[in-house]
Amino acid sequence: MEYGSVIFDLDGVILNSMESEEWKYQATRDALEELGVDQNLDREVLDAILGDKGYEECVRVCGDIGVDPRKAWSLVAEKTAQARMQQIEENGFGLIDGAEELLQELKENQVKLGVISNAPDQAVEMVVDYFDLRSYFKFYMGVRSFEDLKARKPHPNHLELAKFQLKRDPYIYVGDHESDVQAATNAEMDSVWVHPENLDEPTYTVDKLSEIVSVINE
């Protein structure tokens, strides 16, 4: 099937920011320190405050540690966006090997491109601007607010918004987490799982990003 639109996840798919995630946990601890909260929390709790476990879990955990969830998530979003940029500028975070060449090839083939990420919206925009990717992506979006956590992947809402903006079917979503595959299924679109291990649910599984062209054009 030849796809008219390809939508990408950001971290681990376009940006090589997943080899170590300590940067985002440290940024979360820094935010908690600013809020006067004990930073000696395990990663499961930090994941919830980051919003990685969804809106309800973020509300619950923030209640347990005595902070306003909206204020906590907003400050964490700001701190992690700054930390991500610091990692890009100082510690070698960059585009995944072959990512820009792939985007260029798809663009030349008139494929519409987008990005949907569970990262804060400001972080997505910063990455797109820093690497000068606006010319490739017709639409890109992260989690825009604390309330928007309710619509984060695997909820289909953000992918549905991307489909509305791109307006060229069929659509396919490229991700590296099971939540990406689930979101694509929920949005009634095909999926590519960029991962060395097999997963039953995705439409396609590839080991590396460069293999996607053959998938899209098969």
Image (spheres, rainbow, N blue to C red):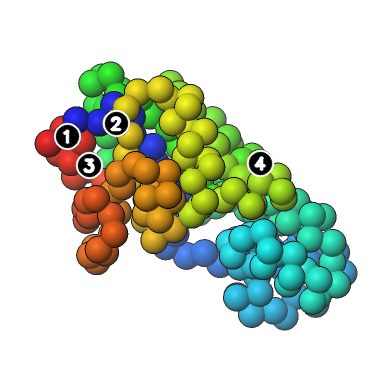
Estimate the x, y position of residue 128 in percent, counting from the top left: 51, 33
The quarter holding residue 61 reads bottom right
Q: Quadrant of the N terminus?
A: top left
Is label 2 in contact with label 1 (beta carbons under 8 Å)? yes
Q: Which residue is mark 3?
A: 212
Distance from the alpha carbon under mark 3 to that under mark 2: 15 Å
Mark number, residue 144: 4
Q: Amino acid at mark 4?
A: Arg
Q: Determine crowd level at label 1: few under 14, some 14-19, many 20+ residues with C-alpha closer than 10 A.
A: few
Q: Which residue is mark 2?
A: 170
Look at 25% across and 63% down and name the residue there. Answer: 200
The mark total stands at 4
| As drawn, 54 above or below 40 | above
Distance from the alpha carbon under mark 4 to that under mark 1: 33 Å
Distance from the alpha carbon under mark 2 to that under mark 1: 9 Å
Q: Say what secondary structure mark 2 lies in.
A: loop
Mark 1 / mark 3, whichever is N-terminal: 1
Distance from the alpha carbon under mark 3 to that under mark 4: 28 Å
Look at 47% across and 27% down and name the residue there. Answer: 164
Q: Which residue is mark 1?
A: 1
Look at 68% across and 51% down and name the residue there. Answer: 77
Mark 3 / mark 2, whichever is N-terminal: 2
Q: Is residue 186 visible?
A: yes
Is label 1 in contact with label 3 (beta carbons under 8 Å)? no
Mark 3 / mark 4, whichever is N-terminal: 4
Distance from the alpha carbon under mark 2 to that under mark 4: 26 Å
Q: Amino acid at mark 1?
A: Met
Q: Determine crowd level at label 3: few under 14, some 14-19, many 20+ residues with C-alpha closer than 10 A.
A: many
Q: Left or right of 89: which side holds 150? A: right
